[in-house]
Image (spheres, grey):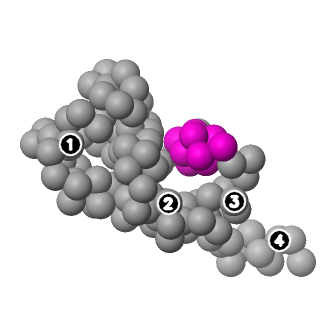
Amino acid sequence: MKVGGNDYPVYFSWIAIENISAAQNHASLDATANQLGTLVNTLKFARVVVFEGVKAGCKKEGIECPFQTSEDAAEAITKFSDANKILEEYAKAVADFYTVVEDDKKKGE
């Protein structure tokens, strides 16, 4: 995904999802999910999502993350539309992370 004109891998691992909730001072993803509509419109939430997504994406690809902090990631963004694309990926990743697979559901019965 593009951040500041450069392409970076974006991925939302369990730790990335957890770090995003923790940055909002939420103890659980449920708290974050319940406020997601409001949070998506906040700049702090967006920069944390961008940073955590790129950081996890770089780790998955085995490359060094270009940003040390969410502030560094925010400094690289010149168009909020870049952040919006990553926010969409985050929302999809959270939904996928919590999706119950039919085989898993049957095992629990």
Q: Gap between marks 1 and 3, in whole Å?
A: 27 Å
Examine the structure image and report whether residue 80 is included in the region drawn in magenta.
no
Sequence-wise first label, 1 or 3: 3
Sequence-wise first label, 2 or 3: 3
Residue named by callout 3: 31
Q: Which residues are magenta?
A: 16-25
Residue named by callout 1: 77
Residue at horizontal 29%, vertical 38%?
74
Residue at horizontal 20%, vertical 35%?
76
Horizontal side of residue 96 vs 44, given as left or right = right
The quarter of the image holding the C terminus is bottom right
Q: Gap between marks 2 and 3, in whole Å?
A: 11 Å
Amino acid at the residue labelled 3: Ala
Residue at horizontal 69%, vertical 59%?
31
Identify which residue, 53 or 30, lies in the foreground.
Answer: 30
Horizontal side of residue 88 vs 22, given as left or right = left
Q: Residue 54 sits in which quadrant?
A: top left
Residue named by callout 2: 39
Amino acid at the residue labelled 1: Ile
Amino acid at the residue labelled 4: Lys
Residue named by callout 4: 107
